[in-house]
Image: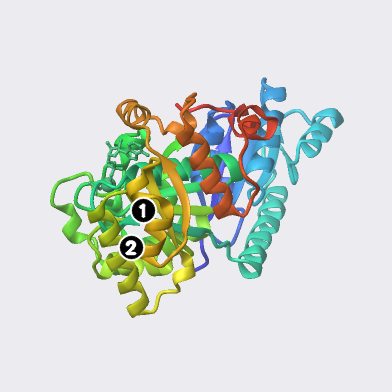
Amino acid sequence: MPKALSLVVIGRSLDPEERMQLRNATPSPLSVVAELPTAPQSLDELNRLRPNAALVLVNGEAPLSFQLVERIKQELPETAVVCSSESTGSDIILQAFRSGAMEFLRLPFADAELSAVFTKIEQQVAQSTEEAVHQGRIVAVFASKGGCGTTFVAANLAASIMRLARRHTCVVDLNLQSGDQPLYLGVTPNYSFTDVVRNFERLDDQLLASYLTPRSKGLTLLAAPTELGRDQEVRDDHVMRTLGLLRTLTDFIVLDVPRALNDLTVQALDTAEEKILLLTQDVPAIRSAKRTLDMFARIGYDRTRVKVVVNRFERKPEFDLTQIEKVLETKVYGTLSNDYPAAVGSINIGEPLVLAKSSSRLVNDFNNLANRLLGLREFTADDAGSKSARSWSLFGKRQ
Ligand SMILES: Nc1ncnc2c1ncn2[C@@H]1O[C@H](COP(=O)(O)OP(=O)(O)OP(=O)(O)O)[C@@H](O)[C@H]1O
Ligand SMILES: [Mg+2]
């Protein structure tokens, strides 16, 4: 059976007649995944659902509709946008195309026109799926000792990547027994890995997209099970298939990996293009980091892919970076300053530090780390106020 074409309708709800016409428009099933108002906030929902097509019903708020079309084309270039209106004046049609719509349909729908437009979209989707399956990059954050800041760093690094690269980034909480990411990101998930497990047989990218909890534009969370005892149900193959599907949905995936290395965590680390090993400047953390690096060498991980990052970094003569590098026999890739009040303050209010108006050095440190991983230039204080840094937040803020 051909894969359903996902469609979001914007402007108003469809009436039963229109729904029927749409259903009959293509040979493959057409699934209306959401009906949203003509409002900036709808963009957040679209970013989450990433539908194949968006049908914008242009009504009284024509300028707002066209503004939305422009934003959809910028942020979701792969979503085909179709405008539709009862008014068929040349100015409205022209505006629709100028703002980036691929087609215009007059209302009420004419079956033949509807069918021609959606067949075209269907062909485009099939072609782009064949041409390039989008592959997001996985960054795993882990530590071999508890309390090194894995959860805090994963949340902030993800937020920083999303901000600087202006790409969709998803945090995956692999602390299946008790995930803290919702607290650190300040979200209340309605869905989690439990839903992935329950619906595993029919899991596809669209269904998985609906299980992601949006944090802010471009930043989502796949939460660990929120009900006690549910972690037992999550198998390695559930996680691996989820990560595979997530790569097609988002540009970056940041894994919050629990410290216990087992089959699941080793497999998850294995899939990550970048592995960030966190440690703090104390003997137990340095020793366990060394053990982990030795173990990686034994199991054949490419060591150059393991990036050692010192968290809670302070200038301490007894544990300076050269000493740490000597013990680990590895270069330190980056440091994240120790700023307890800033870190705890941000966790307490559920706002990643890098998204808050904070003057902490940690913000710069996170941005520098993200930039290095992305292969961009070093971050400077000026970037915080620059146009490009702001462009994500033009539409819809955190809800
Ligand atoms: N750079 C930093 N400066 C100051 N405090 C920090 C820093 N990074 C993390 N912390 C603090 O360390 C504590 C532990 O952080 P976090 O929960 O992220 O650790 P973890 O490694 O995920 O722990 P666990 O092993 O329990 O999952 C938190 O109170 C956090 O505020
Ligand atoms: Mg943690």
Label 1 CB sits under 8 Å from any ligand 1 atom: yes
Point 59% across, 27% down: residue: 38
Label 2 sits on a secondary structure element that is helix
Residue 26 in view: yes
Front one among 75 and 93:
75
Point 65% across, 47% down: residue: 377
Point 27% across, 42% down: residue: 180
Q: Which residue is mark 1?
A: 278
Percent x, y of residue 165? 60, 45
Percent x, y of residue 86? 71, 30
> Foreground mark, 2 or 1?
1
Front one among 370 and 5:
370
Front one among 218 and 190:
218
Separation of marks 2 and 1 at Cα, in angstroms: 23 Å
As drawn, 28 above or below 172 = below
Label 1 sits on a secondary structure element that is strand
Hey, what amino acid is under mark 2?
Answer: Val
Q: How is the rendered protein coloured? A: rainbow
Percent x, y of residue 85? 71, 32
Looking at the image, residue 26 sits to the left or right of residue 208; the answer is: right
- Residue pushed farthest right? 90
Dot label at residue 239: 2
Percent x, y of residue 191? 31, 44
Instruction: Choose top left, top right, bottom left or bottom right for residue 259.
Output: bottom left
